[in-house]
Structures are given as C-alpha cells and as structure tokens.
Amino acid sequence: MKMLITILLGAALVAGLAWASPEDDRKAFIEHYQKRFPKVALDDYVNGVYAIDEAAYEQWLEIEEFAPYELAMAEGKELFETPFANGKTYADCFPNGGIGIRQDYPYFDTESGQVKTLELEINECREKNGEKPYGYKKGPIAAISAYMAFTSRGNKLNIVIPDDPRALAAYESGKEFYYSKRGQLNFSCADCHVYNPGMMVRADKLSPALGHPTHFPVYRSKWDDMGTLHRRFDGCNKQVRAKPLPAQGEDYRNLEYFVTYMSNGMEVNGPGARK
Amino acid sequence: MMKKTRLVALMTTVLCAFGAMLLPAAGTMAEEAASAIEQGKAIAFDRKKGNCLACHMIATGDLPGNIGPPLVAMSMRYPDKAKLRAQIWDSTAANPMSTMPPFGTHRILSEDEIDLVTEFIYVQ
C-alpha cells in the first residue's frame, strides 16, 4: 500500500494529475525541467548531462570529435549489409530498408500486443532468416543499432500510442516502473533523473531524463565499449542493488516506451558518447 | 577500491591495537567512544556500506555528493541521539519519498553498524 501511494505521489507530482494522458505527462515533464533549468534550451536535452554541465561540455565535444563509436558504426554497417545464409538482408525486414527509421522505435505492435524495440526486431529478423539471435546488451547488436541510429540522425522521435487499451497499459506500466522505488537502496529512476538532475552522486552529475534515449546506443568510457539502452537500464538497476531484469523483457521494453515517449519531438543523435 | 577500504580498515585495526599497547589502561570509556567513532566513520565512508558521501558533505570526506543536506552541527540539531539513529535506520518514516536509503529496514547495515555510524555522525 505504502508503495502504491509512493508511486501515485511521484507520478502525480510530476504529471500534476494522477490520471493524466500521456500527452499531459509529456508536457508536465518538459515544464518540470524547464523550471529547474530555465537557461537550458529544449533542443539541448539531447546532450544528456552535458546540457547542464558547462565544464564537462567542452571536454565532451572533444571526445565526440574523435567519435569513439566510429568503429562500431562501420562494423554495424557491414553487418547490416551482409546477406544472411539465405541471401536475404536486414533491409528486407524493416520499413524503408531499415534506413532512417530509428525515430519510430519503440512502437506498439497491435498484432502481437507488445512493445517492439529496434533491437528486438533486429533479432526477430535474424531468427526469421534462420540465424542465431545476438545478445541484447553489447557487441554486434549495438553495432547494427548504432549504424541504424546514424542513418536516422536529425529525424525527430515519433513514438505513437495507438488507440488500443493494451498500448496505454504498456505505457502506464513503464511509467509506474519509472516512479517505483526498488532495490535494497530504495531508489526509483525518478529519484535520480527527475527529482535530482544536476545534483552530484559522489563525482557523477545526474542527468535529466528528458532526452535520455535520443543518442543510444552509446559508447561509454567507463565500459570502454558500446552498450544498448537496456544495458544502461541494467547498470542503473544494479546501482541500487535491485534484481537485474532481462534485457528486452517486457518490463524494460515498456520502460523504454515510456521514457522515449517523454522525449517525443527531440532529434535522434545516436550513437553518442558518454563518460 | 575494495583494496583501499580494506587497507584503511586494517590500518585502523593496527593503530587501535598499537594504541591499546601504549596505554596499559585499555578499555576506558573515552577510548571506547573514540574507537566507536572511528569504526562508525569507516562504515559511513565505505562505498559498499554506508556510502553516506554519495549524498552528504561530511567533514574530511572526499568528493561528496549533494542530494542530501551537509551533515554538520549534528548534536545541536539532533540533541536526542535516538532521533538521529531513527533517521539513519529508516529515512522513509519521516519522508516516504526520501531518496535516502532506509539503512536499517532494508538491512543495508546491521543494528551494530548503525549504532557505530550514529556515534560518528553525532559528533559532526
């Protein structure tokens, strides 16, 4: 009960209303950050923590200049273009041959009643063509996803919640996840990225949730490697000593649906680089 | 990191043992209190234990976060040590939305560890 009240309070605080529509939620979300960071332009949130950290921003620009994700992107392009054993390619599985479509993911698939992410469909494409699926957190899937994001740079996130009660339920479940406290340390995602962006956790400045998904997959210096959004979810969950959930399981897919919807209208700028 | 913490803990133990040798009248109340504060500090600063510095400025602690208020003038603000302990035991009792982990109710620290941390925070 106490948990439920906490969730409702949390959602109500940001959304203003407990039973707001997703569009109301999104507007309230943006307002919340604009109040907190009146000097940050809406378009700059795609730069994550660097949008609110001037000192780190310059350093980051230098890192981006050498684009540490370049190698993965080239590898991703090659994988993307190499035909499967049956002669088909990824282009056959996706709308527009898979080029410039990142902004439409994740979407709610009314046929299967599930949220579909780009990484999930990359693996579905492989399996449909008789290939083994990849692991979801790093490696070839991050490389292919990086290439596909790159071909979509500048396109605006366009997450749709179709008129289907299951789609709204998926969104609501992602939202509930975001505001629920979890793990031994008792943190919600919102505790760090909604209520405390700009604050320091030791030497790390917390980023705003607005704009979080635009640049994934990401090259992270700490990993010295590329990782997908679900790899990042996993890391944040582990930080609070919560039970890790499977990448591309229903919980994380619904979470991605909510988080990405909140950033609707922002430009895809993946792949990105972060500390 | 683990190694450094262990080393600090080891050094503390060695220093304590050394201190005890120098002072034949070991076990006086003052010494016990001093050792409780030292132990409390080690637990409070240990990233795998209290990790209080993640969110609070505490004197002599490096790279503090600032999600929580600086822990200063504590005995003035918490004349009743039990109230201070209660805040560390379960921060959500006073504020259900607190971002501070409930160290006692979630078994992050043991009863004894929380006693020691309380001794240390009380003298800040």
Image (cartoon, rainbow, N blue to C red):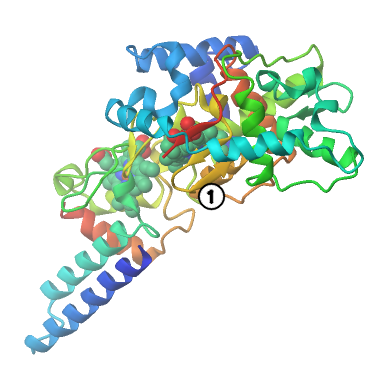
Report in which chain the residue with disc 1 lies: A
Left or right: A116, with B117 as reference point: right
Left or right: A274, with B118 as reference point: right
Residue A85 location, quadrant? top right
Tell me how many marks there are.
Answer: 1
Give how far across and how far down residue B16 sits, in percent: 18, 79
- A247, above or below A45, in the image: below
Are there few (<14), some (14-19), or many (20+) residues within 10 Å of tag 1? some
Please tell me which residue is depicted at 42% across the width and 47% down the height of the picture: B101
Give how far across and how far down residue A83 sits, in percent: 83, 37
Give how far across and how far down residue B27 sits, in percent: 16, 82
Please tell me which residue is depicted at 85% across the width and 27% down the height of the picture: A92
Q: Is residue A179 visible?
A: yes
Residue behind mark 1: A238
Residue A274 location, quadrant? top left
Residue A205 location, quadrant? top left
Q: Is residue A188 visible?
A: no
What amino acid is at disc 1?
Answer: Lys
Element type at marker 1?
Answer: helix
Give how far across and how far down residue A108 sits, in percent: 77, 22
